[in-house]
Amino acid sequence: MSEIGFATPRPAQLRRFKRVFYPAGLRMQKALAEYVNGEDRPDQLVILEHDPVFTLGRNATPADIHMSEDFLAAQGVSVHRTDRGGEVTYHGPGQIVAYPICNLRGGREDVGRLVRGLEEAMIRTAAEFGVTADRLKGAPGIWVETPRGLEKLGAIGLHLSRWITTHGIAFNVRPNLDHFRWITPCGFTDKGVCSLGSLLGEQAPSWDVAADHLQAHLTACLAMAFQPVREPSRSVSALTWRRGAQGPEVLMMLRVPAHGLWWQSVTGMMEPGETPEETAHRELLEETGLTGTLRPLGLSHSFWVDPSIVHFPDAEPRFNTETCFSMEVAPGAEVRLEPSEHSEYLWCGLDEAYARMKWEGSKAALQLLRQALSA
């Protein structure tokens, strides 16, 4: 049998997040791939959880998605075309996504070996929870024989450029399996999709526990010798709104050119010793002169920090985790901008505010506010 994974340890860094919006994940991978491509840089293993999304690989066609764009948008599922191999697949909460971003130059130029190592890590993880999974010739990933027939437990889709790998694997712990019925997953019409939850019921592990096991097996199968890594910085967003004559209005402020020149509501970095709530109140007061009623939106997400906006002393990519709130302020309160950060402001209806927003996290926070206000 051909060799599985790698045997000689190579320096690597582990970056583990929870929720990452899919476009932010693509930017994250691109930044790490550029970093890994440099001389004597460690490989990267990124473990995370995506928002609901269908991703189309190079071999996918629009017919692989069976539902209309309007239907998917109403269900909160986005669609993205990618440069990975394969057809269409689904990512969403309850699924572990792992991106091994590796430099295969220097004697490791064997993508098949990497694929077998990724499959082996998922097979070993499944076995530790009492599930027997195996490979299927001609169908990358891992498969389980169930009373319904063969079902896929873990998927693989990779991209290779100058022997740098991106994309990776998706291992189903407790995702919404109904979403897979809206596509032809990985091009198969005669096979299903399963999860640890569908196979084990209440005995299935949590996302965190399963991720611990998968992380350990990926580390072993890819021979990763982990080096220290910087912890992500932390920030908050406080989606600031008021009750207007025509309905809710969101405060949008234009960042000065040196800070990116995009529209946003209140955001800010947490200072040592602060709670997220304390940061939100402080930033609201410093950026706008306002005070208000703070409510959590139940959203926290992570992203790569663009060094063209925030400058760093070295090349290692930086990441941030943001916790999202809404903040209601009095209808007649005066806004006093901090001119070093924002040049102008507008009070916008929810639709206009959404159209002006640049980033996925801001848009998701606004949708949660919209839901809360209509409940």
Image (tube, rainbow, N blue to C red):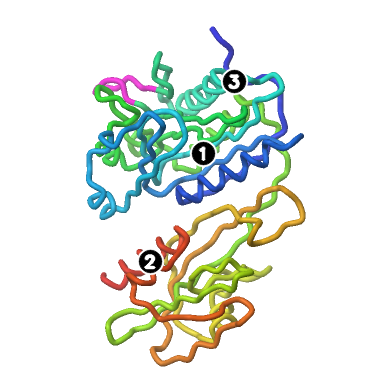
Badge 2 is on which residue?
Answer: 355
Residue name at image x 39 percent, y 36 percent = 204
Task: Say which residue appears at 35% left-offset and 28% top-offset.
Answer: 186
Start and end of the magenta stretch? 143-151
Q: Amino acid at mark 2?
A: Ala
The relative height of residue 151 versus residue 76 in the rendered view (above or below) is: above
Prevailing secondary structure of the magenta residues? strand
* Three-letter code for the amino acid on which mark 3 is drawn: Gly
Question: Measured from the top left, where is residue 363 in percent x and y?
Answer: 41, 62
Q: In the visual, does 202 lie left or right of 293?
A: left
Q: Nearer the viewer, mark 3 or mark 1?
A: 3
Q: Which residue is mark 3?
A: 5
Quarter of the image with the N terminus in it: top right
Instruction: Give the x, y percent position of residue 274.
Output: 63, 71
- Dot 2 alpha-carbon crowd within 10 angstroms: few under 14, some 14 to 19, many 20 or more: few
- 319 or 207, nearer to the observer: 319
Q: Quadrant of residue 14?
A: top right
Marking on residue 211 = 1
